[in-house]
Amino acid sequence: PDGMYPEGPGYWHYGTDYHVMLLAACQPLNRPFAENPLLNKAGGSIMHLTSPTRYAFNFADGGSGLEKPSPAQCWLAAHFKDAVQARHVRQLFTRSMAEDKRLDCSPLSLLWLPEAPPADRAMPTAAVYQGEQAVATFRTGWSPKDAFLAIKGGTPAASHGHMDVGSFVYDAHGVRWMYDLGKEDYNLPGYFGSKRWTFFRLQNRSHNTLEINGQLQNAKSKPCPLVSQTLTGNPLTAAFDLTDAYSNAAAKVIRRVRFDSQNGTSRIEDEITQPAGTVVWRAFTDAQAEVKGDLVILKKNGSQITLRRISTAGTWTITDAKPPTAVEEQNKGFRALVLTIPKADQISSVVEIRP
């Protein structure tokens, strides 16, 4: 309802490409189908979900490949004469050609490529989207090495949904540091049925979010909403009420992010009331990781960032990201950054990510 495709960016491309092909085919027939203005906002959502590294925030059953301009993106930007989307699509085209060393896209992307907009057109650095899978995205800019954070509320009950309520991704220095591991093999027995929540990649234990009292998120949770946001000034903020996703594990759970719009320093703040047991904070990375007291140092591709535990009891550990069975994706090269927080009546956890 707000332009955010609930099945994630992978299915945004799949569904919207065919939708747009139909709309484009109907144009010479005086467009007998009513045009939905939310399509323009949908074009904005896939733009904001794409980070400066070209990786999307691939929530739900999404893959983690590099983004390239799709026919739908190009058509929507041209059709609505949206200068911001047009600039993004053309920049994505240029980068795809330069970085991938080949032109790998649908011919329709070329046919529908929007005209170049004025060079001084301002690009927004923050956006929020309400709906079944509420999302907020923040960035310091649109250059390849700018910092980027995207976070969601939502529900596992959405089509293709994961237990990724409260999960986030983080990029800086041209590197993705905090990943969504992505979908599992659809052919695994019961993937879309009774065994869905037994697979590691679909659980909250494999996402950059919380595990409380050793429990999975509520598979039938109502959509956890975005309850506040600040999209101008510094810091940029968003807060999500995750309570329904943890209905059997805590009385109330609020996750808030604060993003420094100048340097990309981010704070993940969790307010947890009456947790039923230990709280585990996780984030997944393929970077080298080292714990030094309250600090975790990550290194990758000649760059470094740090995570710091602030104002709460807890202990950092680093674990592998292997699932419990051999038939699942083994997540080779990935590890989990784990902050274990002891039970208390009220927990106020702050983790600072500093690029």
Image (cartoon, helix red, strand yellow):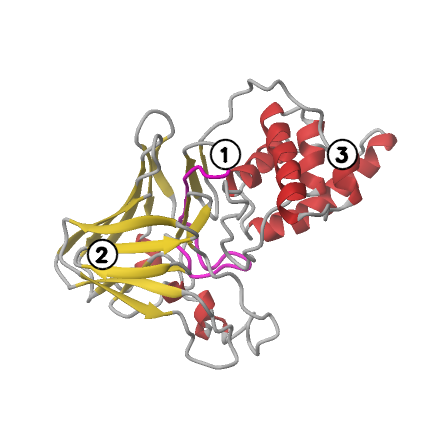
Q: Position of residue 336 (x, y in %)?
A: 35, 64
Location of residue 103 (image quadrant): top right
User: Looking at the image, is mark 2 or mark 1 nearer the viewer?
Assistant: 1
Q: 144 or 228: nearer the eye?
A: 144
Which residue does the numbered mark 3 point to in the structure image? 112
Q: Residue at x 61, y 47 (%)?
A: 12
Amino acid, disc 2:
Ala
Q: Position of residue 144 (x, y in %)?
A: 50, 38
Bounds of the magenta segment = 144-165
Q: Quadrant of the C terminus?
A: top left
Which residue does the numbered mark 1 point to in the structure image? 143
Amino acid, disc 3:
Trp
Mark carried by residue 227: none
| Mark 2 to mark 1 CA distance (whole Å) | 42 Å
Location of residue 204 (image quadrant): bottom left
Which residue does the numbered mark 2 point to in the structure image? 251
* First in sequence: mark 2 vs mark 1: 1
| Mark 3 to mark 2 CA distance (whole Å) | 51 Å
Q: Residue at x 60, y 36 (%)?
A: 43
Q: Secondary structure at mark 3?
A: loop
Query: Label 2 crowding class (10 Å Cα cut-off): few <14, some 14-19, many 20+?
Result: some
Q: 81 or 129: nearer the eye?
A: 81
* First in sequence: mark 3 vs mark 2: 3
